[in-house]
Amino acid sequence: MNLNSEGIVLRQTKTTGGRTMVLLFTKDYGKLSTGTSITGRKKARSSLALHPFTYGNYQIFESRNYRNIDRADVIRSFYKIGEDLDKYMYASCALELTEKILPENLPQPVVFDLLIEFLGELQDRKKKYDTLLIAYEVKLLKILGVSPVLNRCAGCGKKEELEYFSVPAGGMYCASCVRSEEQDEINRQKTSDKRQECLIYRPDFDIMKVIRYLEKNPLTSLKKLALNQNAAEFLMDLLKKYFSYHLDVTDLKSERFFDNNR
């Protein structure tokens, strides 16, 4: 059976015999693991379509236990991303995160379009790449149906005193719920030597306003938006813990770059 779809290369790995394994995010079929023998100067354009950060059209032969890319044509190559180390690492983080949250063989066209939009905006952006990545992650959470609760306390439902953010509860937390959590932690320590990470934070900026704005507005409208360094670092770390807790996304290799450059 032949499959034809637009796609984005998430990852490629060279193997023996001139073969290349390609992890492809297709618009029509979702994430697919494929192989290909497309190489060489005569097929230079097709070879380019196998590089990460490439948006192309792919013809794939599929049998019961085998997929092979027979033809690949570039629609848009975000080659400028590879010319800037910082851009490259932010793009790598977005691709790796997307790979982790995507199941095999399940179309996710909204995520696909969002990733194309992200790569295009990142390629053209001059600075503050972290703001764009944070917006991408916030929008991913919304698409996946696990957005933080912002309009009420995620613990008791109260709409006042929303000064905290609880990762385990999945959103804003009121002062009463925080006090209750603190008491529960004291009680746990009396019966166990293991101390659990609290994962409740008190941001020093209006986190509800920022997340709502990033959820509501398309990435193309954020060209002039730049979060200050403290807010950006706080949200990067918070979202890392949020994806880990609620979607079991951990140990992204690309995140080591950010940890080492803070």
Image (cartoon, grey):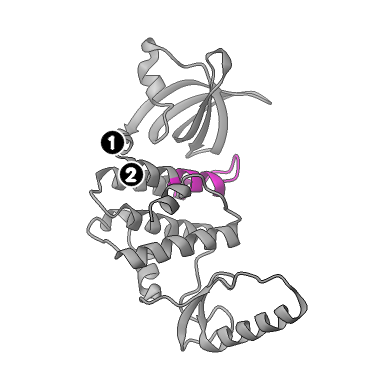
Q: Is residue 145 visible?
A: no
Task: Return the x and y of residue 97 as percentages of the image width and height.
Answer: 50, 48
- Residue closest to the far front: 193
Q: Is residue 189 visible?
A: yes
**Residue 195 location, quadrant:** bottom right
Above or below 155: residue 147: above
Q: Main secondary structure of the magenta part?
A: helix
> Where's the C terminus, which quadrant?
bottom left
Whichever of labels 1 and 2 marks the residue nearer the N terminus, that label is 1
Amino acid type for the residue under numbered disc 2: Lys
Magenta span of residues: 93-110
Query: Are discs 1 and 2 less than 8 Å apart at CB?
Result: yes
> Count the marks: how many?
2
- Which SS class for mark 2? helix
Residue 109 inside the magenta-drawn segment: yes
Q: Name the side, left or right, on which 27 lies relative to 184.
A: left
Label 2 belongs to which residue?
87
Q: Residue at 56% of width from left, 13% of height from top? A: 17
- Residue closest to the far right: 191
- Which SS class for mark 1? helix
Amino acid type for the residue under numbered disc 1: Lys
Above or below 196: residue 138: above
Label 1 belongs to which residue?
80
Q: Residue at 71% of width from left, 78% of height from top? A: 189
